[in-house]
Image (cartoon, helix red, strand yellow):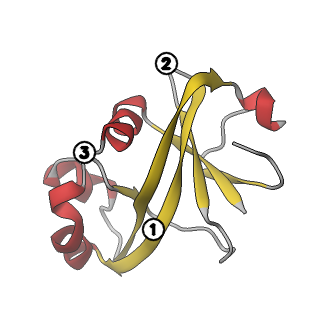
Amino acid sequence: MDVLLSIKPEFADKIFNGTKKYEFRKAIFKRTDVRRVIVYASSPVQRVIGVFQIKSILNDSVENLWKRTSEYSGITKDFYHQYFAGRDQAFAIQVGRISRFKKVKTLQDYNINFAPQSYVYIENIVA
């Protein structure tokens, strides 16, 4: 099972250049069989640009998760704390093997008509 995640282009680029090894989320997938993330770079790019394997999914208090992930967070501490403001728990998807597409794809290539707010499950499609 895959998920397609909307990620800001600056953060998507950091994932594929290896400087961001964690993708932070306020909520995580309900399904436990998700193995890959298909990366949709949101506006202004608005294209599916690559895929990465999920190495692990971390769940901890906001403070502890920052301590565990800050070195390869790809974001500032201020941005992190603004994102998780008012939350007790935080999630981080640890980026495994990455593959940036040579030819970007559209959401329509995945039978999706609009960008998901956070994520959408993708079944039986070769990324």
Q: Residues within 10 Å of mark 3 (few under 14, many from 20)?
A: some
The reply to whether callout 1 and callout 2 are in contact (CB within 8 Å) is no
- The x, y position of residue 18, in whole percent, is 29, 44
Residue 63 shown left or right of residue 31 in the figure = left
Quadrant for residue 50, please give it.
Answer: top right
Q: Residue at x 79, y 28 (%)?
A: 108
Check disc 2 and report the residue beneath it: 44
State left or right for residue 5 relative to residue 86.
right
Q: Quadrant of the N terminus?
A: bottom right
- Mark 1 Cα-neighbour bin, 10 Å: few <14, some 14–19, many ≥20: some
Q: Quadrant of the C terminus?
A: top right
Q: Could you tell me which residue is drawn at 57 percent across and 53 percent down?
A: 37
Within 10 angstroms of label 2, few (less than 14), some, or many (20 or more) residues? few
Separation of marks 1 and 2 at Cα, in angstroms = 28 Å
- Residue under label 1: 55
Which of marks 3 and 1 precedes in the sequence?
Answer: 3
From the viewer's perspective, is residue 27 above or below residue 72? Answer: below
Residue at which label 3 appears: 19
Q: Give the percent coordinates (x, y) of residue 10.
A: 34, 31
Q: Position of residue 11 (x, y in %)?
A: 35, 39
- Amino acid type, mark 2: Pro
